[in-house]
Image: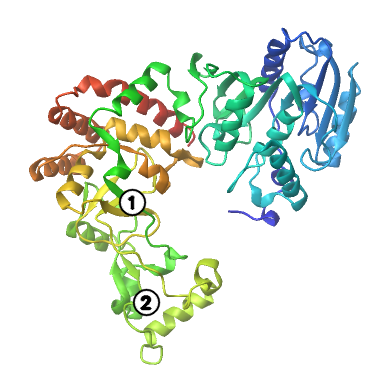
Amino acid sequence: MLVRDQVSSDKLRGGFYTPEDLVRFCWTRIDYLTQGSGKSSLRVLEPSAGSGNFFRFLTGHNVEDRIHSVHAVELLSKESAKCRILLREFKFDSKVVNGSILNGSRPKGIEFDVAIGNPPYLRYQFIDENDLNGISDLTSKMDVKLNGVSNLWIPVLLAALEQLRKGGAFAFVIPTEFLTGISARVFREWVVDNVSNLQLDFFPPESFPGVLQEVLVFSGTKQKTKSNSSIQLIDNGSKQKWKHKLESGHHTWTHLYLPPNIWRSVKESKQIAFTPLIEVAKLSVSTVTGANQYFCIDDDTLEKYSLQDWAKPLLPKSRYVSGLVSDGAIDKKLKEEKALRWLLDFSIKKVNLKSHAGLAKYLELGEQLGLHARYKTRIRKSWYEVPVINPGKLLLSKRSHYFPRLILNKFGHHTTDTIYAGSTLDGKESSAKSLVGTFHNSLTLLTSELEGRSFGGGVLELVPSEVARLVVPNIFLTSLEFTKMNNICTQSNDSGETLVSATNALIASKHPDISLSFFDDLESARQLLLARRIQRI
């Protein structure tokens, strides 16, 4: 993650400019939402105005003649000066404040009819202390707790919505992190309680120059919602639209991407022969070295420094396992490919630098690289003594492309924090085989899309709490059936579709209430979410 002096001034303020089409779309939504409000003289707030893009493209729009006044806020003085000059061209009153909406630039005692804009997308490590204090004051006033790492667009948007009168309209361009981000969950819960007429319009990545992610237009009116409130969703790429009931209590809103009939199928299917993974197994973070490229070594390094006494077998990445089992054949493959197949554990045998020249040289190399000064290493009693976690019988990829892989660790490979490790709750190998052999079905993999989050490059990531919520089959496999599934996985050369189809068929053959048609809608939903995620590459 970058620090403040490693990024540009535009990046430090989240400065990305909104294209004309998205700006005009936002004003169209405002025009629609304010038509029945009885307000013909609208007071408008723009909390992150830049040079005035949202007003540059206002000219000639239906809503222009209905605006009474504009209050715009912009952090950079050069940009606020441009915005001020631009707004002089309009008949309505305007005021441009050079400052932050989060600390002192929010107008006091004024409620606005409209809030519009494109809040900055900026991680908290780039935010200055004044804004952090302003965020604290704002969230305290609104009774909202933004815990953990967050993004500046959330408090900026909250600050703008807090200034709206009851019934006031808003339209903002925001990232789809709104639906899936962990830190955005508090904001989603606030939306459920305080927003009506909510509509999300999705636009593909190319709609927003300079940002490599899909964005959406978030629009509606501010007021206490009713329990039967709904949310309208429109995909402006496919031109499809659908509605969902606006509900609280969901960890993410990824399910809103799914048409309602498919979402109903997902909820109903969880009650047939499936159970949350946490009820049958536990997987958690494995060994955190603080410097994988140093503590994970290949055979050449092992021999060069004579580190055999401190080496444990390692599976560095799940991609080395073509089937469902990590065994001796996989270890042989790692050796042939000169992979980093050893994890150094200096707690195995007492370190005596005087009697072991190779070890002394290797530890000296680590200090020359500055590894002893890293946070995760310097807090240890000895910087090089990694707290190694015992191998898990089950291994699960933390990040994945098409879908997460669950592997039976027959060889006893150690893993780093790129692979979760654990076991079934009963500790039986037969239970582990049954879970691994049935894991890669359409429903389980769909819940990984619903629970996990996607970042740059279309990568799917699961944290342990999300892994625990995955829905898995509660079906027993014989050793012969597990071997068959392992062979199918090993021999298929596609993106995993053969394995998924075979797993679906196996589950259907083992349970009287499940047919292959049961998986049809679930697989369609998985493919829909997968395609949306992969298109971000």
Q: Amino acid at mark 2?
A: Phe
Q: Residues within 10 Å of mark 1 (few under 14, many from 20)?
A: many
What residue is drawn where x is 32% and y is 77%?
A: 348
Question: Where residue 499 appears, x then y in whole percent?
Answer: 23, 36
Question: Where residue 89 appears, x then y in whole percent?
Answer: 90, 20
**In the rendered view, does 234 fall on the left or right side of 475?**
right
Quadrant assignment, res 208: top right
Does residue 503 sit above or below 220 in this rendering? below
Does residue 107 sit above or below 423 in this rendering? above
Mark with earlier residue (1, 2): 1
Q: CA distance from mark 1 to mark 2?
A: 25 Å
The colour scheme applied to this rendered structure is rainbow
**In the rendered view, does 11 fall on the left or right side of 300?**
right
Q: Residues within 10 Å of mark 2 (few under 14, many from 20)?
A: some
Badge 2 element: loop
Which residue is outermost to the left? 480
Quadrant assignment, res 151: top right
* Residue 213 visible (yes or no): no
Task: Determine which residue is flagged by label 1.
Answer: 283
What residue is drawn where x is 84% and y is 13%?
A: 41
Task: Determine which residue is flagged by label 2.
Answer: 346
What residue is drawn where x is 88% and y is 18%?
A: 90
**In the rendered view, does 481 fall on the left or right side of 92?**
left
- Name the one closer to the observer, 335 or 183: 183
Badge 1 element: strand
